[in-house]
Image (tube, rainbow, N blue to C red):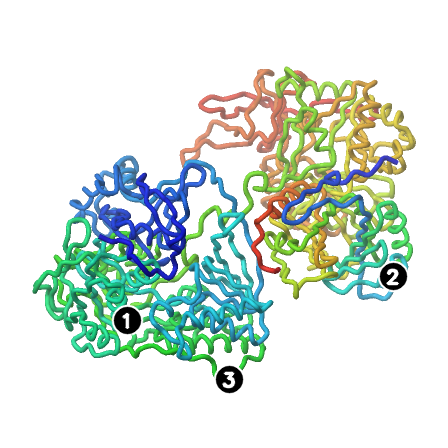
Amino acid sequence: MAEAMTALGGAATEGAIRVAEAPPTGMIALRADLSTRAVGKAVKEATGIALPRALRIETAKDRSVAWMAPDEVLVFCPWEKAAGLAADLSEGLGDTPHLVADMSSARALIDLSGPGWREVLAKGTPVDLAPGAFGPGDFRRTRLGQVAVAIWASGPERAHLICFRSVAGFVFDWLSMAAARDSLPGLWR
Amino acid sequence: MSTRLATGGTRIDRSQRLGFTWDGQPLQGFAGDTLASALLANNQVLVGRSFKYHRPRGVVAAGPEEPNALVGLGTGGSFEPNARATTTALADGMLVASQNAWPGLAHDVGVVNGWLSRFLRAGFYYKTFLWPRAFWKRLYEPAIRRAAGLGRAPDRADADRYEYLYLHADVLVAGGGIAGLAAAREAAQAGLRVLLIEQEACWGGRAATDGVTVDGKPAADWVAGTVAELQAMETVTLRLRTTVTGVHDHGFVTALEAADAGPRQRLWRIRARHIVAATGAIERPLPFAQNDRPGVMLAGAVRDYAVHYAVSPGDRTVVVTNNDDAYRTAIALREAGLTVPAILDARLRVEGALPERARAMGIPIKPGHAVAGSVGRGRVEGVAVCVQAGEGAVLETIPCEAVAMSGGWSPTVHLWSQAGGKLRWDAAQLLFRPDPARPPIGADGAAIVTAAGAANGVLPAGDCLEDGVAAGRAAAKALGAKPQTGKAATAAAPEEAPIEAVWCMPQGAPPALRDKIWLDFQNDVTMSDVALAAREGYESVEHAKRYTTLGMATDQGKLSNIGGLAVLAEARGATIPEIGTTTFRPPFTPVTLGAIGGEARGALFKPTRKTAMDGWHDANGAVWEPVADWRRPFCYRKPGETVDQAVAREVRNTRRNLGILDASTLGKILVTGPDAGRFVDTLYTNRMSTLKPGRCRYGLMCNENGFLFDDGVVARIDDHSFLCHTTSGGSDHVHAWMEEWLQTEWWDWQVYTANLTEQFAQIAVVGPQARAVLEALGGIDLSADALPFMGWTEGTLAGIPARVFRISFSGELSFEIAVPAAHGQALWDRLMAAGAAHAIAPYGTEALHIMRAEKGFIMIGDETDGTVTPQDLGLDWAVSKKKDDFLGKRAQARADLTRPDRWRLVGLQTLDPRTRLPDGAHAVDGTVLPTGIRRTIGRVTSTYMSPTLDRSIALGLVERGPERIGEVIRFADGRGHIEARIVDPVFYDPQGERQNG
């Protein structure tokens, strides 16, 4: 098969923080009644991860499960495993009403590294990003500037963002501007 | 003259000289200066001209209330008009220009307005220029606009950068004076997240200047200690040079930061659970004749300039007051070694601690005295003295260079009032103060703002600090935190005797004096103007404000408000609280458009959505067209080709050989679940649930009013799943539409949806050679038997997982191939390579549109405009008669939607095949309506030159159109007409044979 091309071809820029597009990553949308045991069980069996609580992302090995909505999660996995994992999830859910869709191409994944990531994102997202309010494992669907994104942190100096593929260029340009050297407001140090 | 004192200046750093130019003249100031203090230090007392009469104006204040000192800063792309000199930090190399004066500040020809002032009274433009009517637009308005006005608009794009900053806080404290600091400390000690914002460049407000002590030590020590304590707390954010500009509903607060590095300004968008408004108070001018003369300043401002910036307003300053606070100015000036020839105190009894100190220093105090008028050519050269109780008979004239006036202080209640807090009149202190019984309330009905200190009407320094402590504790308690309960720091300042009301100076001033008593310096509104408005019936404060323009300038009446109310009250024989105040609206101080726009400019102005093949299109001659938020190739131009030639080539090549189109922007929504069939049957006008897996059907979506809003092909994926294609612009809307019905009406249906638009790159391969090129790629059997028209299949095409839909929007043999977007470019490249043998060429949206119009296929947004039904478009075949219900069914039975004379879709052929009907042209039947306009009987919805038919074609909606095939009708075209024949909308291949290849 042809090699997968991400939206930005792995673009990266260094400013007050480093902004870099991640390599191709598998992303599977699952919509179902998350309150039922069958759904939690199917997700756990397919991914090894229990369903995350609201506004959280849980990670184990090379997989993550992010809470997207009261009836939706997004499963992250290695690119080449997405199709198989989607099939596993669907099979595991059986007759339980659900929607599973491989969305690996639909979004761009951008990694932010450096202690200033909170301040870069705070220039465009109304999420409360103060250290005590948003930390590793917290996950928010929100907006950045004018476009929809989801953000989460995986460490004190590392955060991640997904946006739709068609606006990846805009988001990258936006982040490059917001991460210009000497432009951070100096809120959290 | 005003000048720099040899010593002193708490805010300036004399080791750092900063050069700047004022109207081209090179001047110097110090680091720490504001632009206003630097101008005054250089004897630049005249800083502007008034809006209407072009009267000379000088600096009056030292803060954001300044009405006069508005200047132009910078040049070219960095030019900023109307910058307030009193709040602008001086910077090295600053270019500063005066405004509203021509040819120069000192000799302004516009001053002729002054002679005309008796004709330019309140409301003059409603009265004077009424006749002749036509003169208003051509003559009067342009002339008045040229004469009036402030700074000129920049003529270049802004060279600076701006951005937003989102922040959340438990308690936002606006104002870093002693009350604000105390409130912030209490809230922070209760464990809350606190954001403390101060508009000035240093903490402490007036306390340090005004000789306040805290716990027996100078206030400055307590301020420094408290700031250090707050800075050490992780939960506290402090920010100077940032102004809280608005308190909006639900604790949404905006603030504007003058950033040190990076962007020029930062607009903070804050969510606060509670707000403490510790915004201090603003001093009021005194209403005496010629109080607008340069050199007349607020007493507090004179003190600020002397103490903070070591600026002498002149050797001799006369102080005029109705309260004790102004004595601090006299004392400060004397301590700086300057002369105060007299303190004119309108009160008869002057016995407070501060007056006693002034008296002890040997400053002459004249109780019961007032200013009859300032005198001087241009700037102040003296004051004429009279008694306050009289009518202005001049007793003596005291020579002086400056007048320091104080009419008392008004709490800065803006933030309290903006969000709905009410005020009460404090008759003892003569001020409006927040009414704690009627605060601004949040979503839970509880107070969301607490006023503190001077902003709360607590003016004496000792009580002010205590009030700040109480406000901080109240805020903490309101949020469920446990504030400290012990004794807090206590401040002390000399006792002050009560203020006395002076709403006119002298109280019996005759009209000749009242004509020259300025209330609003920037908008040139005098006491007589307001009285005139009241006499003419503008009794409501809101009406009087608009009639006279009092308080409508860029300072929003920060100085003029109470003075104007007092005049209205007198004219109506009412009290000030009976008159009430005007409405306080955000922003507190002007916010630049650059800050409001934030980062959204240039490349970031608006997101452009791009497909996976966007880069290829760009490199291969794409002429771009915006389609919703996407950009799509309109056509691909080859060297030497015009756009029209490129489009015609693309159409011909697709019909004769092979075309390829990037159709990725089409919406693709997966609908799945046990009730999916029922759901799509309700969304679409036709029946979709009978579709077999592997088959496709064209469908229409209508809103509840029966009007068509989207269309597309639905593919049945399996028993439970449908893939719904939407228009390029409609995918988000249709998805939201589906979710709305599922979440609000049919929440018990087992259906899930997902918008897969971005997951797939979709490529249309179109033309007689379409199957040949796909067979060359190999991997899926696409023969007519294996994949008949309106079928779909999936497999691996050229090694890429793909779904192939055999659908046609051009009438040709056509396949649309969907692959994961990550492989979109790869598939495109392989198609281009394999298609070379078949003369493959990409085509853009215009060729797409022409080919669909040749086939009479409708386009949402061309043939529809929100008022068109499927039946209007001859699509009755796609509207089920058997289904019990679908969205729009009932509406489509309404009389207006079934009347026989509706405009309906037809084809239009101009009698001259070289003439193309203008898009949107209206058909007229030659009759004229009673309104005098021509009756229209239709309009053009799509119009093209058809390369296939080598003539013009058009689609249109015409009254009873399909009943009139063959008839010739006329379309208005400017003054003339174009004749066109009504024909069947399918211009090409009416039998539909070409799509079978």
Q: Chain of mark 1?
A: B
**Residue type, mark 2 in image:** Lys
Query: Would residue B761 be seen by someone viewing this image from the given angle?
Result: yes
Local crowd size for mark 1, using a 10 Å CA cut-off: few (<14), some (14–19), many (≥20): many
- Is B516 placed left or right of B541 in the picture? left
Q: Position of residue A136 (x, y in %)?
A: 73, 61
Q: Secondary structure at mark 2?
A: helix
Q: Secondary structure at mark 3?
A: loop
Give how far across and how far down residue B767 sits, in percent.
79, 23
At x 54% / y 78%, what residue is drawn?
Answer: B477
Amino acid type of disc 1? Asp
Left or right: residue B738 versus residue A102 is left
Location of residue A46 with respect to B713 vertically, above or below: below
Is residue A7 or residue B44 the one in the foreground?
B44
Label 3 belongs to which residue? B486
Name the N-terminal-most of marks 1 and 3. 1
Q: Nearer the viewer, residue B366 or B452?
A: B366
Q: Is residue B568 visible?
A: no
- Assess whether mark 2 and mark 3 are in contact (beta carbons under 8 angstroms): no
Residue at the spot x=77%, y=37% of the render? Answer: B761
In the picture, the disc for residue B454 is none
Q: Position of residue B699 (x, y in %)?
A: 74, 41
Q: Above or below — where is A183 with respect to B930?
A: below
Q: Which residue is mark 2?
A: A44
Assess disc 3: are there few (<14), some (14-19) or many (≥20) residues with their C-alpha within 10 Å of its C-alpha.
few
Residue of label 1: B325
Marks 2/1: CA–CA distance: 73 Å
The residues tagged by marks 1 and 3 sit, at their Cα atoms, a distance apart of: 31 Å
Mark toward the viewer: 3 or 2: 3
